[in-house]
Image (cartoon, grey):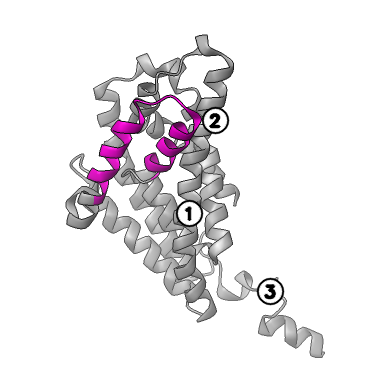
Amino acid sequence: MFSALALGFASGFHCIGMCGPIALSMGLTKKQATNYYLQNLTYQFGRITTYSFLGAVLGIVGQSFKLAGFQSYLTILVGILLITMAVFSFGGKDFASKIPFLSKFLYKVKMNLGKLLQKADYRSRFSTGILNGFLPCGMVYMALTASLAAGGILQSAGFMALFGLGTLPFMFAIVLVGNLMTTAFRIKVLKVIPFVMIILGGLFILRGLELNIPYISPAASSLHVHDKNSPMKMGEMCH
């Protein structure tokens, strides 16, 4: 699960560029001290809650593959999905905006976000974070796709929760560095994300192929050596 936290932390600059404007639109400033910290944390908790929920939903798929004994195939599929999303993300536009039903859903999310940003109570901050979690983001897509291979509902939800926690330091401090963001910076970040997705996708494919490459693509036997119910363990007990 450390990989989820690391992925979230590595996504920090992307979060500042893409989600930062929403945080700045809430009008939180350091002058408000206690209010700043509590409302900021409430917003962040809402965002992480959505990530965890989406991770749990995808975890149902991951758990089904694991129970059927197709974990390696799922890992390969995850890699292919990441690379496919990366290809459709080239050119600066998010691939989700090219899918009709997703585009309509995201439009409604943005409309509701606009209304919530005009309010200043904690419930609205939490709701803003919830909706923010649904907005298109290459790094979130990457983390969600990776969570598929976590192996279960709780594991996938935990993976996404840790991913969200990894992004928290950057998002929490966005008010302090908000003025440093430029349109050029955001464009540069968008151009880098597809390449990161391709690299990660390739690593997932290698892992699923089980080529007996230490750390990168371990063999199936080494992946299950600590499994109490694995055939190898049962055989050792019989002897």
Residue type, mark 2 in image = Leu
Residue in the foreground of this view, choosing between 28 and 68? 28
Q: Is residue 209 above or below residue 12?
A: below
Residue type, mark 3 in image = Asp
Residue in the foreground of this view, choosing between 211 and 95? 95
Please tell me whether mark 2 sits on a helix, a strand or a loop. Answer: helix
Residue type, mark 1 in image = Phe
Q: Is residue 124 magenta?
A: yes
- The residue at which mark 1 appears reads as 53
- Circle 3 packing at 10 Å, graded few (<14), some (14-19), many (20+), is few
Please tell me whether mark 3 sits on a helix, a strand or a loop. Answer: loop
At a point 69% along the width and 82% down the height, the residue shown is 232
Mark carried by residue 41: 2
- In the picture, measured across the screen, residue 223 lies left or right of residue 21, that is right
**Residue 214 in view in this figure:** no
Query: What is the magenta range?
Result: 105-133
Mark carried by residue 227: 3
At a point 60% along the width and 48% down the height, the residue shown is 2
Please tell me whether mark 1 sits on a helix, a strand or a loop. Answer: helix
Q: Examine the residues drawn in magenta and state their main secondary structure.
A: helix
